[in-house]
Image (spheres, rainbow, N blue to C red):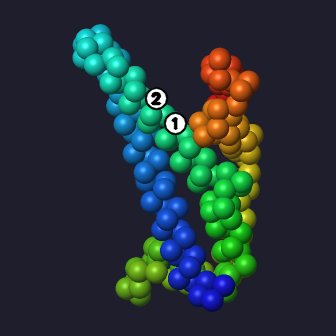
Amino acid sequence: MKNPEKNLKDYLNKLIDLYATTTLYKKQLNIIDQWKTPNRIDTLNKGATFFDLVTKSFTRTFLIELCILVSPKEKYNIHKWLEKVKIHASSLKPTRANKNNESNTKRIQIKKKEYLEIVDEHLTALSAHNETIEKLTSLREKIFTHYDPDYFNDPEKVYKKYSL
């Protein structure tokens, strides 16, 4: 990698954008779900086709984009970014917020060993979700992006097999 600091920062910014978009989809789905109260149900019923379409579309997009972010099968994902960070930790010059503001420095450099420990903690935390990530990837492959013949006639069957 010619310029690991720049490349990995650009890579991280793309992952952050993907995460932000995914979060927005989830928030919108939560808002629609909150409308399912006796006071607002009439609005949902009047626009049932629209709200059903939006809910299905947002749910699929949310799950697909979440899959892109966390699935090891994707070309770019958080796992691969963390692995690349481990390789290029020395050239990244990692820093953290300076909580002791006596020196007026906002950020202080982290030692490579400490930084690698932090990265390993994140990889361990992600691996704790491997089963969920595998189910999410299976949903994407079986029904969201490629309609598997086993689930075409009964799409609900896929949600039972790969329930999140």
The numbered disc on residue 93 is: none
Residue at position x 57%, y 83% in the image: 5
Residue at position x 65%, y 17% in the image: 154
Seen from the viewer's position, the closer of residues 15 and 144 is 144
Evaluate whether residue 139 shows in this view: no
Seen from the viewer's position, the closer of residues 131 and 53 is 53
Residue 119: % across, % down = 68, 67
Q: Quadrant of residue 95?
A: bottom right
Residue 28: % across, % down = 37, 37
Residue position marked by numbered label 2 in the rendering: 56
The numbered disc on residue 60 is: 1
Q: Are marks 2 and 1 in contact (CB under 8 Å)?
A: yes
Horizontally, residue 104 falls left or right of residue 128, namely left
Q: How many marks?
A: 2
Q: Amino acid at mark 1?
A: Arg
Horizontally, residue 132 falls left or right of residue 94, namely right
Quadrant in the picture for the N terminus: bottom right
Instruction: Look at the picture and state if 142 lies above or below 103.
Output: above
Instruction: Look at the picture and state if 66 lies above or below 35.
Output: below
Residue 15: % across, % down = 52, 61
Seen from the viewer's position, the closer of residues 94 and 134 is 134
Report how far apart the C-alphas of labels 2 and 1 lie in the structure: 6 Å
Which residue is farthest front?
Answer: 149
Instruction: Look at the picture and state if 80 lies above or below 64.
Output: below
Q: Amino acid at mark 2?
A: Lys
Q: Quadrant of residue 58?
A: top left
